[in-house]
Amino acid sequence: MKKIQFKEDMKASAQKVYSTMLGLDNIETYNQWTSEFNPTSTYEGSWEKGSKIYFIGTDENGKKGGMIAEIADNIPSQFISIRHYGILDGEKEITEGADVEKWAGGLENYTFHESDGTTTVTVEVDVTEDYLDDFSAMWPKALNKLKELAEK
């Protein structure tokens, strides 16, 4: 896997950006910024450290799928780390095999640094080679959408 990094400055408090990103006040804010990855993107679960969480969407046939992860760390408004360890295929959880091994242990780390009313969000994501180009194109769009939502 390769680690890719993105940064975006947002004219909002770290608490507002964090809450908007995770959809804490309204899950729709999470759904809206992550729609850049999948128009039906959402999550099920908890953002508490140690919790299991599903990042899901539906495919063109309406079948649910996505990633299974654990919240490896969560320091509200400062840092969150997500460790992926499985794939959701419909209602079936797949936690071993070739498809999972490519992603297993992959991290998504988000750091929030606030200074003078602006929060810099730094995203570091482990990505497999076959998704590198797609994610490199999608992440800046997703962060721009998050910025729009957080600055409202």
Image (cartoon, rainbow, N blue to C red):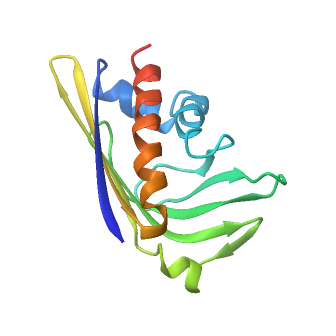
Residue drawn at point x = 48 percent, y = 67 percent:
130
Residue drawn at point x = 77 percent, y = 66 percent:
91
Residue 73 in view, yes or no: no
- The quadrant holding residue 90 is bottom right
Q: Residue furthest front?
A: 133
Horizontal side, residue 130 vs residue 60: left or right: left
From this view, report whether residue 71 is shown above or below residue 13.
Answer: below
Residue 26 x, y percent position in the rendering = 58, 28
Residue 56 in view, yes or no: yes
Q: Residue furthest right?
A: 61
Quadrant holding the N terminus: bottom left
Residue 45 x, y percent position in the rendering = 59, 52
Quadrant holding the C terminus: top left
Q: Nearer the viewer, residue 35 or 131?
A: 131
From this view, report whether residue 100 is shown above or below residue 52.
Answer: below
From this view, report whether residue 57 is shown above or below residue 86.
Answer: above
